[in-house]
Amino acid sequence: MIIPVRCFSCGKPIGQLWEKFKAGVEEGKDPGKVLDELGVDRYCCRQIFIGHVDLIDTISRFKKF
């Protein structure tokens, strides 16, 4: 799944925050604190970041003929 540009529930733009969130989590920070630093405070937006599984590399290996 690719991170959506806007939140499904409230419509807030969140797509630009994915790289910053991913970098913060890879540094070892708590995901909740990273989201607080980025200003993501709504539960609907937070669940998209927390529940996201980055499958684009796995899916891109397969070609559609």
Image (cartoon, rainbow, N blue to C red):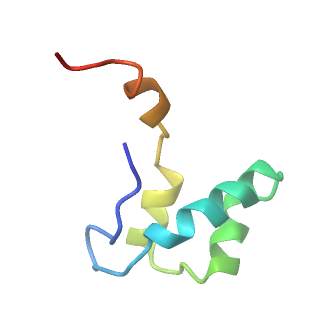
Q: Position of residue 28 (x, y in %)?
A: 83, 51
Q: Position of residue 55 (x, y in %)?
A: 45, 34
Q: Residue at x 26, y 67 (%)?
A: 8
The N terminus, quarter of image: top left
Q: Nearer the viewer, residue 37 or 57?
A: 57
Q: Position of residue 36 (x, y in %)?
A: 66, 77
Q: Going by the image, does 45 lie left or right of 39? A: left
Q: Residue at x 72, y 54 (%)?
A: 25
Q: Going by the image, does 28 lie left or right of 45? A: right
All told, the count of numbered labels is: 0
Q: Going by the image, does 41 lie left or right of 20? A: left
Q: Residue at x 74, y 60 (%)?
A: 24
Q: Position of residue 56 (x, y in %)?
A: 43, 36
On the question of residue 61 being in view, the answer is: yes
Q: Where 48 falls versus 11 (above or below)?
A: above
On the question of residue 55 being in view, the answer is: no
Looking at the rendering, which quadrant does residue 61 occupy? top left
Q: Where 19 falls versus 39 (above or below)?
A: above
Task: Give the residue at the far front of this rendering.
Answer: 65
Q: Where 17 falls versus 47 (above or below)?
A: below
